[in-house]
Image: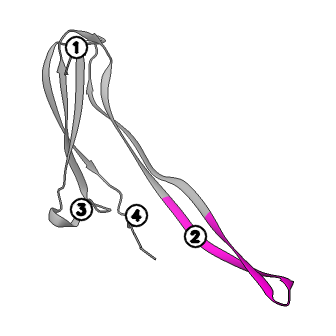
Amino acid sequence: MGNSPMTIGLKVDNGNGNRGIMAGSILYGRIYLSNKQVAAGLSIRLKVIGTEETVVHHTTSEVRTADRFDDRSDTRDHYERHSHTIYNVDHTIKEFPSGHIPRGQFEFPFALQLPKSLPSSMEAQS
């Protein structure tokens, strides 16, 4: 914690055993707050953003003929990339109507239902 007046931590529990966090499942976790002194603040909020990212790699080859004994081949790598936000939620966990976060140590559990329409994850080596 050092000399910082406030420390915030986040722990996400895997509610599905070995299968990971899946579309339609409930994301469970806790937000931890350790506050050494009263601080200005209106709320603690959990913001979850899901991003779909795609990278497609392809190569092109071109044979150039300098003369009949010296053919050269140029191979070029091409990458197509795209990123798209597919899920964005901003959820208030705790409000402080006085505008002040009190001194102390706090734990805020949360449960967030993920939409069933989220796409699956994929990773491939070749």
Q: Which residue is mark 3?
A: 20
Residues at badges 4 and 1 in contact (C-beta under 8 Å)? no
Comparing marks 3 and 1, which lies closer to the viewer?
1
Q: Is residue 124 magenta?
A: no
Name the outermost residue toward the front.
Answer: 69
Q: Is residue 92 above or below residue 118?
A: above
Name the outermost residue toward the bottom.
Answer: 68
Percent from the top left, x then y, of residue 111? Answer: 22, 46
Gap between marks 2 and 3 measured at Cα: 28 Å
Query: Who's the residue at 85% across and 90% down the image?
Result: 68
Query: Who's the residue at 17% across and 56% down the image?
Result: 15
Q: Secondary structure at mark 2?
A: strand
For badge 3, the amino acid type reads Gly
In this rendered view, identify the residue nearer to me: 125 or 110: 125
Gap between marks 4 and 2 measured at Cα: 27 Å
Disc 1: CA contacts within 10 A as few (<14), some (14-19) or many (>=20): few
* Relative to 20, 73 lies left or right: right
In this rendered view, identify the residue nearer to me: 89 or 56: 56
Percent from the top left, x then y, of residue 56? Answer: 56, 69
Q: Is residue 55 magenta?
A: yes
Q: Secondary structure at mark 1?
A: loop
Q: Earlier in the sequence, mark 4 or mark 3?
A: 3
Q: Which residue is mark 4?
A: 117
Percent from the top left, x then y, of residue 104? Answer: 13, 17
Q: Which residue is mark 1?
A: 3
